[in-house]
Amino acid sequence: MNAFLIFLRGNARWVAAAFVLTFFSTIGQTSFIGGSAGHIRSDYGLSNGQWGMVYMIGTLASALTLPYLGAIVDRLTYAGSR
């Protein structure tokens, strides 16, 4: 236990940053889907399997856009970088 506390004291900045990043990453898609999936399924009359398919297609579609959107973003000139 003592080594763990020494580690935390020596790396408090990094541990805090990791905690904050982890905490704020849950606010997006994960929390929305977790809190809304039941209502969405009931509104559209979807089974668990059908909802899983919709979620999978949406996730894969968004992943497929990343290389294209990333290339566009890489070519943009930002006002702050001039």
Image (cartoon, grey):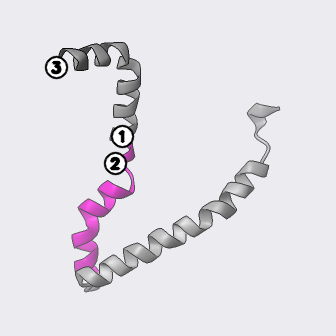
Against 15, residue 59 (above or below) is below
For image coordinates 28% across by 74% down, the residue present is: 40
* 1 or 3: mark nearer the eye: 3
* SS of the residue under disc 3: loop
Residue bearing mark 1 = 22
Whether tag 1 and tag 3 are in contact, CB under 8 A, the answer is: no
- Residue 73 as seen in the image, left or right of residue 19: right
Against 52, residue 11 (above or below) is above
Q: Where residue 80 sits in the image (x, y, percent)?
A: 74, 32
* 2 or 1: mark nearer the eye: 1
Q: Where residue 66 sits in the image (x, y, percent)?
A: 61, 61
Residue bearing mark 3 = 1
For image coordinates 77% across by 33% down, the residue present is: 81
Residue bearing mark 2 = 26
Q: Where residue 30 sits in the image (x, y, percent)?
A: 33, 56
Q: Amino acid at mark 1?
A: Thr
- Residue 24 as seen in the image, left or right of residue 42: right
Q: Where residue 31 sits in the image (x, y, percent)?
A: 30, 55
Q: Amino acid at mark 2?
A: Thr
